[in-house]
Image (cartoon, grey):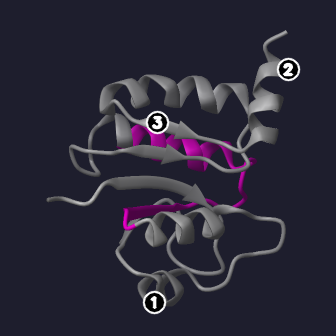
Amino acid sequence: MRRQRVFLFGEAERGDYCTPLTCRSLLQLSEMLGNPPEETQGIFYAIQALLYNRELIFFRVEEEGFSTQDYLRGIKLLKNKQVGAELTAICMPGVGDIEIIEQVTPVCKIYKSLLIVTPEDLYDYLTCLN
């Protein structure tokens, strides 16, 4: 049986920007991305995905929640199915930006996947709608 796959946008100490990096273990995650920068959540969510035995595709952005062009570049990769045919979830901690969420929503429909954001991000998104 194939492992469920999570595509995660996040900030990290090292690794190539805007490049999907497949990770299958905590050791591999640590070697590829290093430590989490302060005030970020991407590595935390990556660890959770791996501990729940999910395959992880980490897409490093320069600054979680603020590097709009990085997020849009990743969304474009997802739209073109350049990361494979199956995704269980797309995780975007730190993103409450209406533009980014509205761009990723149709992608979630394409993959029939969940969008994972923090409660604070959901609040930011919902209050932007008014």
Residue 39 forms part of the magenta stretch: no
**Which percent across, then down, holds residue 52?**
44, 65
**Which percent across, then down, holds residue 123?**
82, 30
Query: With 37 as the anchor, is 70 left or right in this view?
Result: left
Task: Using the rendered view, name the quadrant where residue 110 is placed.
Answer: top left
Mark 3 lies on residue:
114
Give the residue displayed 75% in from the left and 48% down from the top: 66
Residue sitting farthest toward the top: 130
Question: Which portion, as a residue range, is magenta?
Answer: 53-77
Q: In this view, does 35 lie above or below 6?
A: below
Mark 1 lies on residue:
27
Query: With 62 as the anchor, is 54 left or right in this view?
Result: left
Separation (CA) of disc 3 from disc 1? 26 Å
Secondary structure of the residue carrying tag 2 is helix
What amino acid type should be assigned to the residue bearing mark 1?
A: Leu
Query: With 83 as the anchor, is 66 left or right in this view?
Result: right
Mark 2 lies on residue:
127
What amino acid type should be assigned to the residue bearing mark 3?
A: Leu
